[in-house]
Amino acid sequence: MKKIYANLLGEWVDLSSDDTCLMGSRMVSPSVWWEENAEIWSPDTKDEHTMYQLDYVTIHYKGKDYRISPIFIQIVSE
């Protein structure tokens, strides 16, 4: 079994344990997001001096929407 963890506001949380958690541009469950290629937003070209061009993953977790860098996601096999 794979568990998907994310560092949200400085706290590592198990996204897999929340049935209402959604991820990616298609807003699917964490397990589906991982199984279907773990999509991140990453433009082909990047403008300088703006955070808007940095890679990110959209996460809806416990009623809040997050936009985080993929480096703050960990996949754990149990």
Image: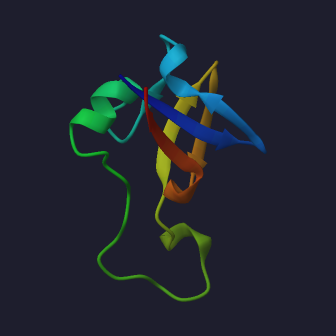
Q: Is residue 8 left or right of residue 55?
A: right
Q: Residue at x 50, y 13 (%)?
A: 20
Residue 23 position within the rendered picture, expressed as x and y whole percent measured from the top left: 42, 34
Q: Is residue 51 visible?
A: yes
Q: Residue 71's quadrant in the figure? A: bottom right
> Hey, which residue is sitting farthest bottom in the picture?
48
Pick out the residue farthest to the top.
19
- Residue 18, image x and y in percent? 54, 14
Answer with left or right where residue 31 lies relative to residue 56.
left
Q: Is residue 28 visible?
A: no
The C terminus appears in which quarter of the rendering? top left
Residue drawn at (55%, 35%) of the image = 5
Q: Is residue 48 above or below residue 8?
A: below
> Which quarter of the rendered picture does the N terminus lie within?
top left
The residue closer to the viewer here, 32 or 60, is 32
**Residue drawn at the location 31% of the way across and 37% of the way down:** 34
In this rendered view, identify the residue nearer to me: 38 or 64. 38
